[in-house]
Image (spheres, rainbow, N blue to C red):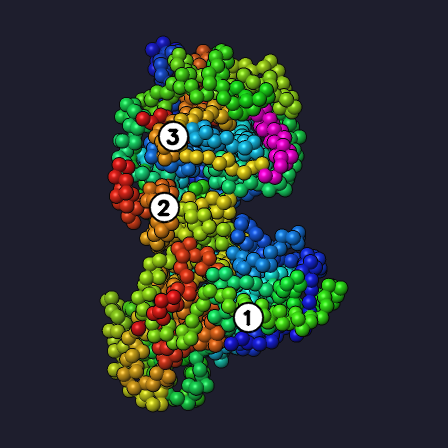
């Protein structure tokens, strides 16, 4: 092969991801010169739009950054605003929000693992095509996704863009009977879900994008696998308080994209999401979640983003199991424990972070005396991952070419797309994020 | 009755993908739908897509916010027989059109700072502003049952009739206490078209107007109703402009807000 | 008609006993001071003293939305039972409700009787309960503050007891089934009842002067009042939804899923923009003013000419539920040209 | 003021309960088959309809001027006048213009042999007893010819029972004239005097008048004292025609007209067609001009 032979690989419109993006790779000889993930989703400037808005409008606006993450944005925004206002919502409210978040996780992971990623590994162009060969699996995945939606419907009032959540509480608390039947449905889903672990374990995961990676996730607020917390940890052992997130995470614009990229203050790229959470806190898993973790990661988490699908399945099992547990806790609470917290409007700054399906999500708001937004900043998991996506794509191309110098463009493209999809990127989320003012 | 499978495309312009996700959220009907429709172009879900063939039905979500969006929209229009607008962004402009009075460059600078020069961005407007649509399905996001009704009607050779009456209809049908009457809140129910089952008032929250305005809303009376309860223009406007800002701005909301708060 | 007495303490047991005649629906407090008409199991929730529920009893007869006709596959269209409520007891009917029920009967059971209404009507037991007016009640002035027919039983609250009026054989059946709770009414009961009526009459603070109203309305068709009202009305339809005598409905077809077709019927309001639109787009009542006027004329002009009585029973629901604060009584007084 | 003493079994009713021939539930359609369909003019199609139940088909009675509800469940339901005469048993006709959802479906998907739903007959119809023995002046504008064609057919079938019959019929253009050949042969046979007008000829061959239909009135000889006028047409047509007839000497109670309003139920329940307390579907659609004048909004003045 001519060492000066230059070629470009372009995926003009990435399929099976949420939003609009493409890939552009330039290879000269066996050197990968350029790897770009372009995001050409139109910008909607949410943070600028928020400026001057009353804090009560914030959640309704910010939830629309992205549908699949809408519950996560809503909950995180509310938590940040509550911090700014000094509101402490009652226990039941926090439980219900956690449950909502678990519902979102179930829906999102079920969709991603079964409908977007599995077709890749099993060799189908889409879940529609896959359903002809694996009708039972697809039907089950849909049922599972529906269950996630049912949780969001019950607690948020709608599967997408919840309406029932308020600063300090809820518009209407779900009826105990509904919580009870939800718990039963979650419990009933657990066994069949465990059944899919074998299918997942049987799928060979290629290692060509594997390389040492830095992971970031929130430290759980309890000594268990949990999706919220106030400390941010890296797999290297650094710890930051969430409201000092800016010391750890830096954002910058890049020429080829409508999305901003993040990196650590040190300039290194990192990964957030299921794999990162398992890497840092997988040992805290209990019950069926632990079982699945041990079967799918017998040697613990190893660096390879293509394993993210497995990690999501582990979390799916965790979410179903934990969801049923939370329902039980909720049912045991006294009836009047969910009254919205009272509060006074005041100026302040609030930062909140949560572990949402795709990774760590940050919301920061500064409010003035009237409760109007002075500045807003949202950093989404996808924006944080983008730099790492490009890093892994580079690695993938390099090792694919090294293994197979005459590799066909089609294979390269598929490889690149698989890397991108493994991250479960949410393009809508990744644009219009960032600090204002 | 048409007995061949209609060819279908589903497209997203700039938006949150919520309407496409709502289609995926029709879990019980999804598999059967994919058998009854020949979905040939759906980038969010499929890898092998035909971007050129004629389409019997095309669904389009989102606003036009880039030149690329506009080109894509015109292309889809040209190749489809029945074009369906999915969601409030496509029908009314939704959130992205919320503050169109601010020049795009200013917004871009606010968010992207100095790195903004490379952005392809035009003023966000609803897709329905640029090309004619046969069917408009509002909602942020669309309601599953309305989507299914629409598809089923098209498959049966007719059109679904969607409600045109205001949210108050459904609100009263579910015997909610009125947020305006009993709580003095800014509820957009009387100017918003129903179909959501008055979701928000049924959860004890005022309607934010996510389904867009009814035909001939009584703009003045709605405003007066809130003003008479001592609510400021700013507070009225911040609720009303969320989902169908272009409509209300045209009716005069913008001037009023500016008069009260020139700094805005 | 028969008059009995029942002790106030017997009420819960009495309501419990009503369950034998069907699902008991009664006013229930939703939020402080706001009531809804709900099916109750726990009889202590019943608040028959509540003046008005957001929706009136008409929902027990025709649901706000129901399927009339449906078809599956290639079978011919068939009647749907979606609207049927089965045996139902409406507990806590007030005089205005009962008078409204009379109007509904007149409309729905005349000419071509309405199958769906009739089924529920036949299964409906009406147990009234006396009320005490607030500032939005004006039934007294419309002649609808009392009833002597169309209900089955009526409970008039007196000190420590009820005077119970038995109107129908079904009412009598109920009394017989709970014989132990009832005694014949005494002279004192009757005296107290009449005395209460008199006090109640004086307690009304709102009244609508209906004298010559139809004629005045006829003369003032073009009065600027209607334009003004058209400017204020949101055309949200709330008043018609909550009105016990508003009966308009719409019929909508839909294909909810493969192979199933339905014709649904839902309450409608003449205030909605499309109410009088015909194919081709011509709107017979294109302006809000015309539509608002139509509603008021229907209540106090056309209906009176046809039946000698208005189709408003003075319950005050529309006053309470109008988001912009339009008040029927004020409207008519304004048309008449007097301060109210 | 109260109407006294009724319980559900004999609740206050206004007029004796009735039943439609199409079934005890007045909202439930009876299946009927499309026997034939043919275009009258490009956008108006004539359907021959026969009830599937033979007893109903042969026993179906109605009056000219009445209408039926045609239903395709899942698509919609709409009122259509009967352009055929009850004197012709077994099947009836409908003349339908493409106007919206239901009618689009009828044009695009319904073919001969298909089954649709019908309920009716509805409305009062023309007062044929009254018209008997008198001269008739029928005045039609546009689609108003559809119900008048039913009356015309009725009169022709019972020709000896009626006096002179004059038809004035205005259309927009020559290719919009409904039943053109049939009307021509009526005129040839001398059964009726037929005068046609078009608003403009658009270059098509045309031997009738060019101008508005009201002008035809000036050209015919009628004796208002022995004649009933029956008018059918769109609102604009009424606006000019009715007063013209009055000027010509017709008593306002000797002019009949048929009105179109939005109708959902067709049986006087849903309220949509009500003007005051008059239900166009139940108490109409045929009114005398005097009635119409006394109902606000009924005809736009
Ligand atoms: C007594 C009578 C006799 C008639 N006779 C004939 C006849 O012989 N031939 C003929 O061709 N036509 C006739 N018509 C008119 C015919 O009924 C209409 O053309 C028909 O309703 C069109 O139905 P569609 O579904 O095709 O139209 P659409 O416009 O889709 O109307 C469907 C239904 O919705 C109503 N509607 C219309 N616009 C709106 C809107 N904006 N919002 C809500 N609802 C709306 C209509 O009233 C109709 O009931 C008659 C009408 C009446 C009242
Ligand atoms: S709460 Fe809102 S939607 Fe409900 S009746 Fe009041 S104004 Fe209308
Ligand atoms: S009540 Fe209003 S904001 Fe809520 S879902 Fe309905 S239309 Fe949208
Ligand atoms: S018009 Fe108003 S006061 Fe009269 S009966 Fe109806 S709701 Fe009650």
Mark 1 residue's CB less than 8 Å from ligand 4: no
Callout 2: few (<14), some (14-19), or many (20+) C-alpha neighbours within 10 Å? some
- For the residue pair D107 and A297, the one nearer the viewer reads as A297
Q: Secondary structure at mark 1?
A: helix
The answer to whether the residues at label 1 and label 2 have Cβ atoms under 8 Å apart is no
A333 within the magenta span: yes
Mark-to-mark CA distance, 1 and 3: 59 Å
Q: Main secondary structure of the magenta part?
A: helix
State the residue at coordinates (32%, 47%): B248
* Residue A399 in the image: above or below residue B55: above
* Quadrant in the rendering for residue B234: top left
Q: Which mark is residue A347?
A: 3
Residue at the spot of label 2: B231
* Residue C285 in the image: above or below residue D221: above
- Horizontal placement of A16 versus D243: left or right? right
State the residue at coordinates (49%, 26%): A354
The x, y position of residue C221, in whole percent, is 34, 71
Whether discs 1 and 2 lie on one chain: the answer is: no
Quadrant position of the C terminus of chain B in the picture: top left
- For the residue pair C282 and C207, the one nearer the viewer reads as C207
Q: Which mark is residue B181?
A: none
State the residue at coordinates (66%, 67%): C164
- Horizontal placement of D122 versus A387: left or right? right
Q: Which residues are magenta?
A: A312-336
State the residue at coordinates (55%, 54%): C36
Given the current orientation, which residue lies at the most extreme right position?
Answer: C180
The answer to whether the residues at label 3 and label 2 have Cβ atoms under 8 Å apart is no
Mark-to-mark CA distance, 1 and 2: 43 Å
Q: Secondary structure at mark 3?
A: loop
Residue at the spot of label 1: C198
């Amino acid at each position: 092969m001519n060492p000066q032979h230059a070629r470009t690989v372009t995926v003009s419109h990435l399929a099976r991801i949420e939003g609009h993006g493409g890939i552009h790779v330039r290879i000269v000889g066996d050197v990968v010169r350029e790897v770009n993930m372009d995001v050409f989703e139109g910008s909607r400037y949410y943070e600028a739009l928020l400026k001057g808005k009353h804090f009560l409008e914030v959640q309704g606006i910010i939830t629309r950054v992205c549908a699949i993450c809408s519950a996560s944005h809503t909950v995180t925004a509310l938590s940040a605003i509550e911090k700014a206002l000094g509101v402490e919502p009652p226990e039941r409210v926090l439980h219900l929000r956690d449950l909502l978040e678990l519902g979102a996780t179930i829906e999102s992971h079920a969709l991603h693992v079964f409908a977007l990623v599995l077709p890749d590994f099993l060799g189908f162009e889409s879940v529609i095509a896959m359903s002809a060969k694996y009708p039972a699996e697809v039907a089950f995945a849909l049922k599972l996704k529906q269950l996630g939606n049912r949780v969001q419907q019950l607690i948020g009032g709608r599967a997408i863009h919840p309406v029932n959540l308020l600063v300090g509480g809820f518009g209407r608390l779900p009826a105990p009977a509904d919580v009870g039947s939800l718990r039963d449905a979650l419990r009933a889903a657990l066994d069949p879900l465990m059944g899919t672990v074998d299918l997942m374990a049987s799928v060979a995961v290629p290692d060509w994008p594997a390389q040492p990676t830095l992971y970031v996730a929130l430290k759980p607020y309890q000594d268990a696998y949990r999706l919220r917390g106030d400390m941010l940890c890296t797999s290297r052992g650094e710890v930051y308080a969430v409201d000092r997130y800016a010391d750890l995470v830096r954002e910058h614009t890049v020429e080829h994209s409508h999305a901003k990229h993040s990196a650590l203050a040190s300039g290194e790229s990192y990964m957030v999401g299921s794999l990162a959470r398992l890497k840092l806190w997988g040992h805290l898993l209990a019950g069926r979640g632990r079982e699945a973790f041990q079967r799918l990661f017998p040697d613990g988490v190893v660096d390879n983003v293509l394993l993210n699908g497995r990690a999501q399945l582990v979390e799916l099992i965790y979410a179903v199991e934990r969801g049923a547990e939370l329902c039980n806790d909720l049912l045991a609470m006294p009836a009047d424990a969910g009254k919205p917290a009272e509060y006074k409007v005041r100026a302040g700054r609030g930062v909140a972070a949560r572990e949402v399906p795709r990774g760590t999500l940050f919301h920061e708001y500064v409010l003035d005396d009237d409760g109007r937004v002075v500045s807003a900043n949202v950093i989404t998991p996808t924006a944080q991952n983008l730099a790492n996506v490009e890093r892994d794509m580079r690695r993938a191309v390099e090792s694919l070419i090294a293994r197979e110098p005459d590799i066909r463009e089609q294979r390269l493209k598929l490889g690149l797309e698989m890397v991108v999809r493994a991250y479960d990127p949410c393009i809508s989320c990744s644009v219009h994020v960032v600090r204002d003012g | 009755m048409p007995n061949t499978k209609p060819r279908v495309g589903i497209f997203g312009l700039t938006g949150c993908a919520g309407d496409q996700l709502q289609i995926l959220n029709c879990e019980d009907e999804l598999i059967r739908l994919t058998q009854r429709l020949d979905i040939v172009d759906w980038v969010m879900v499929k890898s092998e897509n035909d971007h050129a063939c004629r389409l019997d039905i095309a669904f389009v979500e989102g606003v036009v916010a880039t030149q690329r969006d506009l080109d894509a929209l015109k292309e889809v229009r040209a190749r489809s027989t029945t074009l369906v607008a999915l969601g409030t962004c496509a029908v009314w402009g939704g959130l992205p059109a919320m503050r169109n009075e601010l020049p795009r460059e200013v917004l871009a600078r606010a968010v992207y700072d100095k790195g903004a020069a490379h952005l392809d961005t035009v003023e966000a407007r609803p897709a329905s502003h640029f090309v004619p649509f046969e069917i408009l399905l509002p909602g942020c996001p669309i309601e599953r049952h309305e989507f299914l009704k629409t598809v089923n009607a098209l498959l049966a050779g007719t059109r679904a009739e969607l409600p045109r009456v205001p949210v108050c209809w459904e609100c009263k049908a579910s015997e909610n206490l009125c947020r305006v009457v009993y709580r003095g809140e800014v509820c957009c129910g009387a100017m918003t078209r129903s179909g959501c089952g008055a979701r928000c008032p049924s959860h004890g929250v005022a309607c934010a107007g996510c389904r867009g305005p009814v035909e001939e809303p009584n703009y003045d009376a709605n405003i007066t109703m809130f003003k008479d309860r001592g609510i400021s223009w700013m507070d009225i406007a911040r609720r009303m402009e969320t989902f169908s800002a272009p409509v209300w701005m045209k009716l005069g909301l913008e001037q009023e807000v500016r008069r009260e708060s020139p700094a805005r | 008609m028969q008059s009995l007495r029942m002790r106030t303490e017997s009420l819960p047991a009495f309501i419990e006993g009503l369950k034998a005649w069907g699902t008991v629906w009664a006013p229930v407090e939703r939020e402080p001071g706001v009531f809804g008409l709900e099916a109750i199991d726990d009889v202590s929730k019943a608040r028959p003293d509540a003046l008005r529920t957001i929706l009136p009893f008409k929902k027990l007869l025709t649901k706000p939305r129901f399927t009339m006709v449906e078809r599956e596959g290639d079978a011919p269209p068939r009647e749907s039972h979606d609207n049927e409520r089965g045996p139902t007891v409406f507990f806590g009917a007030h005089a205005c409700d009962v008078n409204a029920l009379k109007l509904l009967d007149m409309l729905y059971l005349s000419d071509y009787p309405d199958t769906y209404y009739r089924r529920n009507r036949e299964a409906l037991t009406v147990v009234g309960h006396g009320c005490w007016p607030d500032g939005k009640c004006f039934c007294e002035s419309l002649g609808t503050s009392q009833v002597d027919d169309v209900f089955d039983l009526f409970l008039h609250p007196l000190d420590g007891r009820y005077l119970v009026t038995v109107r129908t054989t079904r009412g009598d059946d109920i009394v017989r089934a709970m014989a132990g709770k009832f005694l014949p009414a005494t002279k004192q009961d009757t005296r107290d009842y009449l005395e209460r009526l008199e006090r109640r009459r004086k307690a009304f603070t709102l009244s609508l002067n209906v004298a010559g109203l139809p004629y005045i309305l006829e003369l003032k068709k073009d009065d600027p009042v209607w334009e003004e009202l058209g400017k204020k009305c949101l055309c949200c339809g709330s008043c018609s939804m909550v009105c016990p005598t508003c009966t308009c409905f719409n019929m909508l077809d839909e294909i909810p899923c493969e192979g199933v077709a339905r014709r649904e019927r839902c309450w409608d309001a003449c205030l909605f923009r499309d109410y009088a639109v015909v194919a081709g787009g011509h709107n017979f009542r294109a302006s809000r003013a015309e539509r608002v006027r139509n509603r008021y004329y229907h209540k106090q002009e056309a209906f009176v000419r046809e039946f000698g009585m208005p189709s408003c029973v003075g319950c005050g629901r529309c006053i309470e539920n109008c988001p912009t604060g339009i008040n029927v009584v004020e409207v008519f007084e304004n048309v008449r040209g007097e301060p109210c | 003021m109260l109407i006294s003493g009724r319980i559900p079994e004999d609740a206050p009713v206004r007029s004796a309960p009735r039943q439609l021939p199409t079934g005890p539930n007045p909202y439930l359609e009876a299946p009927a088959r499309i026997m034939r369909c043919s275009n009258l003019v490009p956008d108006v199609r004539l359907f021959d309809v026969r009830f599937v139940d033979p007893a109903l088909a042969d026993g179906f009675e109605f009056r000219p001027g009445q209408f039926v509800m045609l239903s395709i469940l899942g698509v919609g339901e709409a009122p259509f006048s009967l352009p055929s005469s009850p004197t012709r048993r077994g099947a009836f006709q409908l003349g339908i213009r493409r106007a919206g959802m239901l009618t689009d479906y009828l044009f695009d998907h319904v073919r001969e042999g298909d089954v649709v739903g019908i309920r009716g007959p509805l409305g009062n119809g023309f007062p044929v007893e009254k018209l008997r023995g008198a001269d008739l002046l029928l005045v039609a504008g546009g689609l108003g010819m559809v119900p008048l064609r039913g009356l015309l057919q009725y009169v022709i079938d019972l020709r000896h029972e009626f006096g002179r019959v004059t038809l004035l019929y205005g259309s927009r253009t020559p290719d919009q004239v409904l039943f053109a050949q049939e009307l021509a042969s009526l005129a040839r046979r001398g059964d009726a005097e037929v005068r046609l007008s078009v608003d403009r000829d658009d270059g098509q061959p045309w031997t009738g008048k060019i101008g508005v239909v009201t002008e035809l009135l000036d050209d015919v000889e009628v004796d208002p004292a022995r004649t009933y006028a029956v008018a059918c047409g769109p609102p604009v047509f009424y606006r000019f025609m009715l007063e013209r007839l009055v000027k010509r000497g017709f008593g306002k109670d000797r002019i009949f007209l048929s009105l179109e309003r939005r109708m959902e139920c067709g049986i006087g329940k849903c309220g949509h067609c009500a003007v005051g307390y008059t239900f166009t579907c139940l108490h109409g659609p045929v009114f005398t001009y005097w009635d119409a004048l006394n109902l606000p909004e009924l005809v736009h003045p």
